Image (spheres, grey):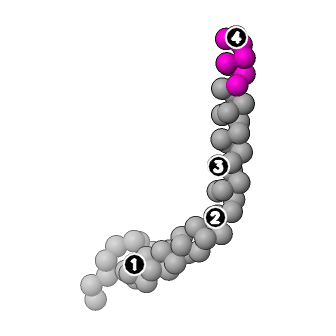
Amino acid sequence: MIVLLIIGGLALIALIAVVVGIVDAAHARAWREVAADRRGEWEARRPEFHGPYEAWDED
């Protein structure tokens, strides 16, 4: 009986993993678009550095 419970639990974990993988693959493109938009906004706010060192150039 315990063996069947363990096997059933492992099968349930495997089933959940498959479902999560399918859902994640279905939404991956949308998340990549969100990440690209956020990166574009971040790059627009990022200060411009001048010279070989990453320091503020006040001149």
Residue lying farthest bottom?
59
Residue 20 is marked as: 3
Q: Secondary structure at mark 1?
A: loop
Residues at discs 1 and 2 in contact (Cβ within 8 Å): no
Residue 32 in the image: above or below residue 2: below
Which of the 4 quarters of the picture holds residue 17?
Answer: top right
* SS assignment at label 4: loop
Q: Residues within 10 Å of mark 2 (few under 14, many from 20)?
A: few
| Three-letter residue code for mark 3 | Val
Q: Earlier in the sequence, mark 3 or mark 1?
A: 3
1 or 2: tag closer to the N-terminus: 2
Identify the residue shown where x is 64% and y is 56%: 24
**Residue situated furthest left in the rendering:** 58
The residue at 43%/83% (across/down) is: 44
Quickly name the residue at label 4: 1
Tell me which amino acid carries mark 2. His
Query: The residue under label 1 is which amino acid type?
Result: Arg
**Which residue matches tag 2?**
27
Q: Position of residue 6 (x, y in %)?
A: 67, 19
**Location of mark 1 (residue):** 46
- What is the CA distance from the residue labelled 2 to the residue labelled 3? 11 Å
The secondary element bearing badge 2 is classed as helix
Residue 28 in magenta?
A: no
**Eyeballing the image, is 51 above or below 31?**
below
As drawn, the residue found furthest toward the front would be 1
Binning the other alpha carbons within 10 Å of mark 1 as few (below 14), some (14 to 19) or many (20 upward) gives few
Q: Position of residue 7 (x, y in %)?
A: 72, 22
Give the mark toward the camera: 3 or 4. Answer: 4
